[in-house]
Structure formats: structure tokens, C-alpha cells
Image: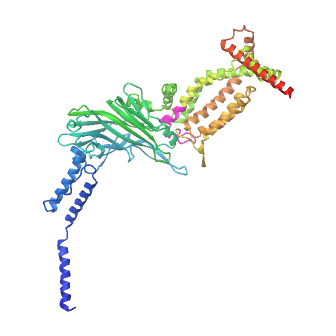
Amino acid sequence: MDRNTVIGFVLIFLLLVLWQQFNAPTPEQLELEKRRQDSIALAQNQPYAEIDTSIEPTVPIGGDTLQIVNDSLRQAQLSGTFGPFAAAASGDGKVYRLENDLMSVTFNSKGGRITSVMLKNYFKVLEDEKGEQTKVPLKLLEDEKNRFGYYLPMANVPSGGVNTDDLIFTPTVDLNTRQITFRASAGGNRYFEQKYTLREGSYVIDYDIRFEGMDQVLSGNVEKVQLKWLNYLDKIELNTNYERNYSTAYYKPVDDDPDYCSCTSDDIEKLDDQKLKWVSNTNQFFNSSLIAETAFSGALLETEMLDVTNDDLKVLNTQVDIPFGRGSSESFNMDFYVGPNEYALLRAAGPDLEDIIPFGWSIFGTVNRWVIRPIFSFLSSFIGSAGIVILVLTFLVKLALYPLTYKMLYSQNKMAALKPRIEKMKEKYKGDQQQVQMETMKLYREFGVNPLGGCMPMVLQMPIWFALYRFFPASIEFRQASFLWATDLSSYDVIARLPFEIPFFGAHLSLFTLLWAVTTLIYTYYNTKHMDFGSNPAMKYLQYIMPIMFLGFFNSFAAGLTCYLLFSNLFNITQTVVTKNYIINQDKIQEELEAYKKKPKKKKSGFQERLEAAMKEQQRVQAERQAQKGKSGKRK
């Protein structure tokens, strides 16, 4: 290759390099091309608006022209999907925050909805594998999977409507009045608006929605707009099993008492065309409730249980119908309560809203609401320790029930006074258990002793006991309240942790429960050591086995309840010792028994006659069987 050839190749190479540099796109052109490719990709993925790509552009695609084409393409896509709300469908949501003295509320302009509510006076406790506890701020409605939006039916969009969760609302914030307004424009003077106003010193948020010019936008036959509220309940408490059983969806018909979905299984309540005053998503101690100024026109409430290993507790799906009268300007006003299940606060927030606190049904709930709760509130007003309040409450309950306790102990002493006679009777009819039972009943009747007299007072106390069983785990006043070694009276106390989990017991040991079992055994021994178990020896041992069995049952119960049970046993032992040894006069009992024996006997009641006849018949049948066995033995 000669020199001229080499020079020629070099010149050609330089010309190619210069030509590429000269014709290379500018950064602005590269950015425009990237936008064009993104628009094409978006159009291909768009499920509603199809773009005809067979049409060739008749204008050369330069910088400004390309931008116009891309904007038009984007607008066509949004219009196809969102109709008149296309202008509110682009952009990114921004975060805003309003506060009062009780809570901090976070909003997002995408959907114009609440994304988190932090309660300033409450905390969530996290516990690691070693049992170390850490307090973190307590937040409600913060799960990223939550949804809260209105479905606006429209005939001019392929999907049949628009969900406001997908719209970017324009905010107007007034910090002085703690108010934020979100507006999604539908063009002209038509818009959908949501307005939130925080009240000072309250967990209630004034929440109003407004339909302006929506009669021109929504489908012609629309008479209601549906609110779709999907709420993943967070695990807030340490005892998640307790929390799961106290968490569900509640609702209040306008002309009826509140009701709720199942707490222990999946459930669905279809309330089509039923007027409702409020709906509530409720945890064990906190809730989020929508309260209508007038009434919702229907609802569907669905609860879904989640696996115990899931990070969330339950899923609550609430769909509420908002009435729409087809006016050019309409509004629907609500209150949004997001806060603790405090009785007084809920009672003030909405009619019967306090019924979401699970105090129990029928007489048990009545006792809790109108007897136990007022006494507890009164004591708490001047006693700072919840544990001391439980102690005083136990004393007052035992004092109120003492007349029944005295009657029970008096009946037991009368039976104990007859024990020597019963022992002689057993010796006389040794081997004939039926005759012993008949003679024992005859002896009791002769001296006016009711063998059930010691049981009935205990039965009459059961409503109080069952009411308290529901009161402690339902009352937020015990939440994270410490007493002695217990750090949270609304959950179980832990004195020792086990390296493994025992079925029906757990992986921990509750000291309150252990002490309750020990004191129950002591009380049982002292209270029944003079009782006669000859007719049913198994009962003598069963009464000692029961506390051991209930040890596992109560081990995971609220410490407030097991603390009450322990105090109750201590008062029972004290009352029994004092009453039997210092109040009841044994000599007087003997005189009373002898005096009754000398009284003219009343005619037996029909029940007594039938009972005695049945026992005699049973005795006759048993005697015949024994005689038959004797004859069979002689034949052999």
C-alpha cells in the first residue's frame, strides 16, 4: 500500500468521525426521544385506551412537534381511562400533616386520604426474643395495603367509573384552623372534594365530601356513591390471641342496636338499602369509625382472618353507600373518629358508639356498663395505681356479696354440725349406699338443712364473676398499666420464660395465675375439710384437680383478671376464717337445729315426694339385682 492510499483512508476515517459528531442528537433531543418511547410503552400497557399505531405522522418529528404529539398521546390515554378527571390523573402524590394536642394525622394528595394517624398519648410495645421491650409511637391506618376511595360511576369511561384513590387531588391547607381540603377537578366548575378539620382536644376529625356539578359527570341512573375502605388491622398488643378475639367490624342501624361481624372467623354482613348511622373498624383497644351526620344508605362489611404468623391481624373490607340526589351541588358530612376505646369519648362521639367495647352480652354487659365501670372510674379518679384500684374493687365486690357468702358459710356449718349423726348412719347402713343417701336426705329434712344452701349463693355470684372476666381485657385503662411484677395488666404477666411452648399453656409462666392456683387449693381445703364426700368420693379429689387444670387456662389471661382472682381468693380465705371462727356461733347452730326438729313438720312438697319415691324405687331395683346375683351364685 503506497503513501497516497494510506492518506486517503485516514481522511475518510476523519470525515466519518466528524460526520457522526455533527449529526449526533443533542441532550434535549435524547430526552424527547426517551419520552416518546415511554409514551409508546405506556400506550401498549394501557388496558382501556387503544392507540392506532398504523397511522403514520404527516409532519416531521422535530423537538417541539414531538413534545406536542407525546402530550396529546398522554392526554388521550388519560381521557380514555379517567374521562373528565383526566387532568387529576397525572402527577405524584404529596404528603401533608395536621396536628392537635392528641394526634398527628398524615394525608396524601393521591386519593386525598388519611395514610396514618399517630396517637401522641399511646405507644406500641415491641418485644424481642429475649423478652426485652421497646416502646414505639402507636399509629393507626398506616398499612401501605390500605385503601380508602370513592367509586364514581361514569358512562363515558371503559371501566364504568373512576376510583378516587387513583386521582391526584389539589390541596388547600389552613394551619390556623387545622383544616385541609382536597379537590379533584372534572373540568370547568365541576369537582369532587374532601375536607378534613381537626378539633382541638379531640380524636374526632370533621370529614365532609362535596359533589359539585357531578350530576353532569356521573351516570344518569346513579343514586349512591360507594366508599371502598380496605383496612389491614395491625398487631398492636403483645397478646395477639386476645387482640384477635376482640377485633372486628361494627355497625349501627339507625333504628336498631349496634351489631358486629364474627370475631373468631371470616364473616360477611350484607346490609343493602339499610340505613346506618356509623361503621367502625375496631382493634382490642382502638378503633377507626365513620359516623354519618344523617345516614349511610347501605353497606357491606367483610372480615378475613389472617394466619397467626402474618404481620397483620385481620383484613376488614367495608363498602359504604353514600346517598346521591342528582343535585348540581351536594354534600355529605361525617365525623371520623380515630382513637382509643375510651367509654366516655366514644359515648360523646356517636350514638351507642361505646358499644364497640366488648363488655359482654346480656346481664354481663349490663353489670359492667352500669355497675363495675362507674365504680372503677370513680376509684381511678383519686387512686393512681390500676393494681390498687383492682384491690379496692375486689374488696367492695366481696363486701357487697358478703350476705350471700355468710349464708353459704352458715349452711356449711349446719351440715358440719350434723356430720357426727351422718357418720353413725353410715356405720349402721354400711354397704347400702342407697339407704345411706335416703337417710341422709331424711336427716337434712328433719333438721331443716338445705344441702344446696351452700351452692346457691355461689351461683348468684356468677354474673359478677363473668362480668369481671370480660371487663379487664376490654378496658383500655389497664393497657400498659404496671403493678408489682406485671408490666401490662391487659396482657398476661411473665415471671419466667420457657425454652419451649406447652400446648394450652404457652411458653411463659404467669405468677398471678400460679398464686391463684395455690390460694384456690388452700381455700378449697379449709372450706371443705368438714364436708362429707362419702356418697361421691370422686368429688373430694376433683375439687383439687380443677385448679391445676385451670392453671393452663388462665396462664395467658389478662394480668388484671388473674390479679383480681388472686385478691378474691385472699378475701375469701379471710372471710371464711373470720366468719366461721368469730361470727358464727356453733352452739347457736346446735340450738337452731334442735328447735327445728321439734317444730311440727310441714307437708312434703310434690318435688320432695317424687324425689323420695324415686330413691325408694331405685333402692328396690338395686335390692332385686343383688338378690338375683345371690341366687345365681348359689346355682353355681
Quarter of the figure with the N terminus: bottom left
Residue 471 screen position, x and y as percent: 51, 32
Residue 304 screen position, x and y as percent: 44, 41
Residue 231 screen position, x and y as percent: 39, 42
Task: Residue 474: say if magenta.
Answer: yes
Residue 412, can we see it?
yes
Looking at the picture, the colour scheme in use is: rainbow
Place residue 195 in its image quadrant. Answer: top left
Q: Is 137 located above or below residue 392 in the figure?
A: below
Q: Is 288 located above or below residue 30 in the figure?
A: above
Q: In this view, does 192 lie to the left or right of 586?
A: left
Quarter of the figure with the C terminus: top right
Residue 227 screen position, x and y as percent: 32, 38
- Quick one: 176 or 527, which is closer to the camera? 527
Q: Is residue 3 left or right of residue 386?
A: left
- Residue sitting at the far top: 600
Place residue 463 in its image quadrant. Answer: top right
* Magenta residues (range): 469-489
Task: Residue 55: say if magenta.
Answer: no
Residue 201, can we see it?
no
- Residue sitting at the far front: 635
Q: Is residue 284 left or right of residue 1?
A: right
